[in-house]
Image: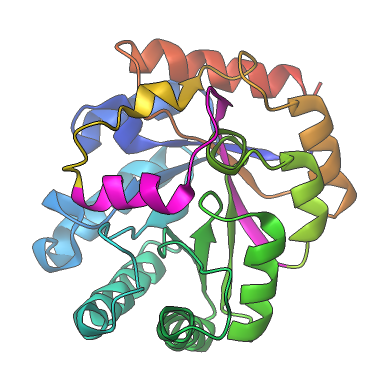
């Protein structure tokens, strides 16, 4: 029996959701993840009939919804004036996840400040605490994606948030590409919080300031910043993530949940996703 379940991000296929579900099923995966922040999958755009139709399509192929992506973009939850609306929208996404028989909502929350005494840190912690408590009350988890800070900084922040409903969506490539952290050691650091993972690979080309990088994602407008100068997402096995060691670490901490393939670049998404699924299956025997 395989140690992990394999999933794919439906949006990575870059086709409509119905066809993406069919493509995922052809790959023989156990689960799927989908964005629920805009378009058809935004909670306010989905009728009850359409929700049932999507879930029925997924379950008819023997798959489940591994996670829902609730990344609202921008600066995450670091700006106090934006948080009331973002928090309420995030709660609706948690409710949607539960309607899809799913317990995990993944997101980026913004860059966690190293200074835990600054105002931005407390604003972020308060928002995440509220969302974590809401998710916990629904037997769900609001899972922050690794990337803009080191595992050590994130672990300290999670302890400060202090709710079991606020956890981690572990993305090893983000750590490699943005902070240069060791994604294998990071598994042990965050072992108590990992509820979902993204299977992604990449390399860092040049050291960067994560705050500058994520501000660019949020705002753009930095004329002399070319992200391709700093990091490159690669097909699985072609980047800096040591997947054999990484999967061993996940196994050792007792995580046997989803490895959900996310492919955010490239001109051949179906081919890249098929390669990634084969790659992961081969490493599990």
Residue 115 picture location, percent across and down? 57, 75
Quick check: 244 left or right of 142? right
Task: Report which quarter residue 58 is drawn in.
Answer: top left
Report the coloring of the rendering. rainbow
Q: From what the image shows, is residue 181 above or below residue 157? A: above
Q: From what the image shows, is residue 73 above or below residue 209? A: below
Q: Is residue 61 visible?
A: yes
Q: From what the image shows, is residue 218 above or below residue 193? A: above
Q: From what the image shows, is residue 39 above or below residue 98? A: above
Residue 205 picture location, percent across and down? 53, 22
**Quarter of the N terminus within the rendering:** top right
Q: Residue at x 31, y 73 (%)?
A: 90
Q: Is residue 218 magenta?
A: yes
Q: Is residue 163 visible?
A: no
In this orientation, which residue lies closer to the viewer: 231 or 91?
A: 231
In this orientation, which residue lies closer to the viewer: 211 or 86?
A: 211
Q: Residue at x 20, y 54 (%)?
A: 41
Task: Report which quarter residue 179 is drawn in.
Answer: top right
Quick check: 9 left or right of 221? right
Q: Residue at x 27, y 81 (%)?
A: 83
Judged from this view, the residue extending furthest toward the right is 252
Residue 24 picture location, percent across and down? 41, 28
Quick check: 269 left or right of 196? left
In this orientation, which residue lies closer to the viewer: 134 or 87?
A: 87
Quick check: 191 left or right of 14? right
Stretch in magenta: 193-219
Q: Is residue 21 magenta?
A: no
Task: Report which quarter residue 114 is drawn in.
Answer: bottom right
Judged from this view, the residue extending furthest toward the front is 224
**Quarter of the C terminus within the rendering:** top right
């Amino acid at each position: 029996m395989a140690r992990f379940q394999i999933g794919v991000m439906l949006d990575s296929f870059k086709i409509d959701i119905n066809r993406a579900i069919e493509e995922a099923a052809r790959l023989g995966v156990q689960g799927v993840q989908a964005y629920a922040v805009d378009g058809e999958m935004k909670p306010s755009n989905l009728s009850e009939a359409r929700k049932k139709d999507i879930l029925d399509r997924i379950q008819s192929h023997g798959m489940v919804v591994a996670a829902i992506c609730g990344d609202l973009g921008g600066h995450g939850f670091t700006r106090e004036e934006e948080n009331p609306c973002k928090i309420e929208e995030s709660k609706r996404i948690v409710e949607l996840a539960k309607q899809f028989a799913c317990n995990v909502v993944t997101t980026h929350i913004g860059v966690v400040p190293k200074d835990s005494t600054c105002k931005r840190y407390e604003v972020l912690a308060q928002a995440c605490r509220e969302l974590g408590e809401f998710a916990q009350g629904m037997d769900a988890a609001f899972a922050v994606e690794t990337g803009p800070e080191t595992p050590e900084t994130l672990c300290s922040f999670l302890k400060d948030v202090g709710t079991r409903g606020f956890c981690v969506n572990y993305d090893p490539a983000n750590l490699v590409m943005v902070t240069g952290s060791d994604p294998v050691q990071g598994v042990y650091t965050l072992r108590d919080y990992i509820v979902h993972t993204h299977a992604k690979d990449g390399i860092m080309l040049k050291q960067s300031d994560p705050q500058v990088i994520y501000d660019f994602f949020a705002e753009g407008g930095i004329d002399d910043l070319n992200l391709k100068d700093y990091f490159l997402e690669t097909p699985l096995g072609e980047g800096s993530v040591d997947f054999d060691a990484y999967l061993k670490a996940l196994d050792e901490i007792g995580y046997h949940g989803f490895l959900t393939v996310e492919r955010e670049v490239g001109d051949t998404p179906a081919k890249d996703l098929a390669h990634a699924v084969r790659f992961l299956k081969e490493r599990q025997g």
